[in-house]
């Protein structure tokens, strides 16, 4: 089997006095969309923030392309080729769409321009609002900007936290289509409560419960496994 | 009435309030006081903008900002003395040479205090990022140390700030007496505001700083070494305070080690009125404080400081976050 691009090995993370992650382990391979699933408070967002260096783990290791990154600062991790789309989208609302992209661009090179053209092809709405402040965009457009921004750099891995949150079903379908196109260019780790979106996009899944990874497998198997879905996700039927 | 027209209403109301004193003062005196108020406003802008920018970007309450202002005044004092001794430009009849020495002095003060700011940020501020309470304690401590250092280097007594020859006196424009230096202060202050504004609006560096004011965590995860920007913004804020110090000292023609403590109160009020983290807010707040202080100081001298406090209370009760949003 090929080398994993990202290895999370038994990480423990604290937020203040709270011991949130209590041994999270998983691996991510090239060409996959990995979905982290679990109930609220299971530790999915904390895991993404730990990978990104925003909540450094107190124990365990995180390796990206075989390089330990768990002790590194977020800006150094980002420069290794990991993009992050947080749950609240993290947009700079007082900056224009263009300025949001320019802040995200680590170098204003020809390659970045080519990538920008690709992003605007995937999310054509952003082109229409190029000079508008990010704060005036609709929920869907804001999410497109949030996902599009890290793509201007040559990232190998994209961490996306709850992209469907607060969006109408039709916008979610559009987002699924867009993320499908991105899959061809990079690995994605997706935290998603919306099982419909998760099942449409994911290749593999990792189930979280009480700060631990408790199950993993192929997404198509989870779709069929009613017992697991009911036990850990509180959903039944087709989801 | 359209939304755009409604947006102008508060601005028109403020202009109307600042025109009110003309009912009690002769137009000539009103013009003199207005020029003096705008000049004071531009000087306050220089001090408060640095304070506001540092708070907005780094979420740091820097109570030592006033001491950096005083250091600017003292470095300016020494720079003027030395440069004037070499060149004689300060005593020259030429306004051009007077301007040259004045700008050189401000540059030396700005660079000197920016370097001092880097040391303060690294040694004092960096260990207490994220904790406002510790920041207040430690920066008050830094303020005391910086003030004592001034006493050690320059002595505890007041000094007379040398002023370029052509900055003294006034012009008589159609029977209106206009002091020379306030006009220079307005010009230099406006130029600095424009420079800061253009850097923040037009450059990528400015965009990153504005983005950082809104969401410093996100700037980090985009690959920008936010600590380097923190140091840069702190140095820039310190330089602005120092230039303000040098210009203020030329305005009042004297310096003393505790001068920063007096001005920091005004800087705080201006920054809060304008909205912490907003450059436009700083300039508008500073003009409001400068003008109201001058009008009231003429009409009811004892109420001059009180009007500034009243202005703060009124604005905060209408808009608790200040007039402008951070990052604007």
Image (cartoon, helix red, strand yellow):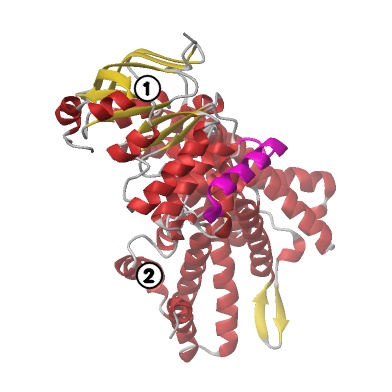
Q: Residue A32: x, y in percent?
A: 45, 24
Q: Residue A143: x, y in percent?
A: 43, 48
Residue situated in front as seen by the camera: B206 or B176: B206
Residue situated in front as seen by the camera: B260 or A59: A59
As displayed, is residue B193 above or below residue B136? below
Q: Is residue B47 magenta?
A: no
Image-quadrant location for residue B169 = bottom right
Residue name at image x 35 percent, y 29 percent:
A35
Instruction: Identify the subunit bearing mark 1.
Output: A
Say whether residue B149 is visible: no
Q: Residue B274: x, y in percent?
A: 44, 62
Considering the image in quadrants, where does the C terminus of chain A appear? top left
Residue situated in front as seen by the camera: B198 or A227: A227
Q: Which residues are magenta?
A: A106-126
Residue situated in front as seen by the camera: A82 or B95: A82
| Helix, strand or loop status at disc 2 | helix
Q: Is residue A118 magenta?
A: yes
Identify the residue under disc 1.
Answer: A56
Tell me the chief SS of the magenta region.
helix
Kindly identify which numbered label has been placed on residue B323.
none
Residue name at image x 59 percent, y 34 percent:
A153
Q: Residue A156: x, y in percent?
A: 54, 26
**Is A56 left, or right, of B31 in this rendering?**
left
Identify the residue under disc 2.
Answer: B311
* Of the two numbered discs 1 and 2 in the rendering, the one whose residue sits closer to the viewer: 1
């Amino acid at each position: 089997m090929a080398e994993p691009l990202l290895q999370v090995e038994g990480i423990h993370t604290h937020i203040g006095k709270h011991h949130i992650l209590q041994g999270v382990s998983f691996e991510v391979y090239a060409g996959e969309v990995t979905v982290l699933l679990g109930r609220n408070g299971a530790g999915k967002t904390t895991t993404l923030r730990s990978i990104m260096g925003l909540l450094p783990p107190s124990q365990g290791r995180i390796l990206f392309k075989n390089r330990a990154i768990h002790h590194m600062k977020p800006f150094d991790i980002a420069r290794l080729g990991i993009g992050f789309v947080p749950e609240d989208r993290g947009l700079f609302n007082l900056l224009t769409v263009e300025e949001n992209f320019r802040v995200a661009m680590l170098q204003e090179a020809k390659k970045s321009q080519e990538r920008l053209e690709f992003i605007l092809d995937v999310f054509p709405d952003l082109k229409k609002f190029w000079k508008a402040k990010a704060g005036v965009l609709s929920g869907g457009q804001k999410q497109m900007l949030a996902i599009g921004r890290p793509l201007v750099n040559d990232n190998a891995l994209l961490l996306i936290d709850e992209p469907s949150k607060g969006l109408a079903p039709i916008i979610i379908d559009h987002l699924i289509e867009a993320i499908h196109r991105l899959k061809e260019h990079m690995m994605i780790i997706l935290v998603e409560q919306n099982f419909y979106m998760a099942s449409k996009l994911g290749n593999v899944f990792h189930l979280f419960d009480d700060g631990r990874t408790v199950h993993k497998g192929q997404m198509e198997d989870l779709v069929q496994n009613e017992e697991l879905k009911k036990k850990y996700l509180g959903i039944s039927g087709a989801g | 009435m359209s939304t755009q027209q409604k947006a102008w209403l508060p601005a028109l109301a403020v202009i109307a309030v600042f025109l009110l004193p003309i009912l009690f003062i002769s137009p000539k005196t009103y013009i003199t006081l207005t020029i003096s108020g705008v000049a004071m406003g531009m000087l306050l802008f220089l001090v408060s903008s640095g304070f506001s920018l540092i708070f907005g970007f780094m979420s740091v309450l820097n109570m030592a900002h006033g001491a950096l202002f005083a250091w600017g005044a003292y470095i300016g004092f020494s720079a003027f003395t030395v440069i004037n001794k070499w060149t004689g430009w300060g005593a020259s009849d030429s306004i051009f040479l007077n301007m040259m020495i004045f700008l050189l002095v401000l540059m030396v003060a700005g660079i000197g205090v920016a370097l001092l700011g880097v040391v303060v940020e690294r040694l004092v501020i960096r260990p207490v990022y994220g904790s406002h309470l510790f920041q207040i304690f430690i920066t008050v401590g830094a303020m005391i140390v910086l003030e004592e250092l001034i006493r050690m280097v320059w002595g505890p007594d007041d000094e007379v700030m040398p002023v370029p020859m052509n900055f003294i006196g006034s012009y008589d424009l159609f029977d209106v007496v206009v002091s020379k230096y306030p006009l220079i202060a307005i010009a230099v202050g406006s130029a600095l505001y424009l420079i800061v504004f253009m850097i923040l609006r037009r450059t990528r560096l400015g965009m990153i700083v504005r983005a950082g004011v809104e969401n410093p965590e996100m700037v980090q995860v985009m690959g920008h070494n936010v600590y380097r920007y923190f140091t840069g913004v702190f140095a820039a804020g310190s330089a602005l305070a120092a230039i303000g110090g040098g210009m203020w000292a030329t305005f009042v023609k004297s310096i003393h080690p505790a001068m920063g403590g007096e001005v920091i109160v005004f800087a705080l009020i201006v920054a809060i009125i304008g909205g912490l983290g907003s450059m436009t807010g700083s300039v508008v707040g500073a003009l409001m404080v400068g003008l109201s202080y001058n009008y009231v100081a003429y009409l009811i001298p004892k109420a001059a400081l009180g009007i500034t406090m009243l202005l703060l209370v009124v604005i905060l009760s209408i808009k608790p976050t200040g007039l402008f949003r951070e990052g604007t």
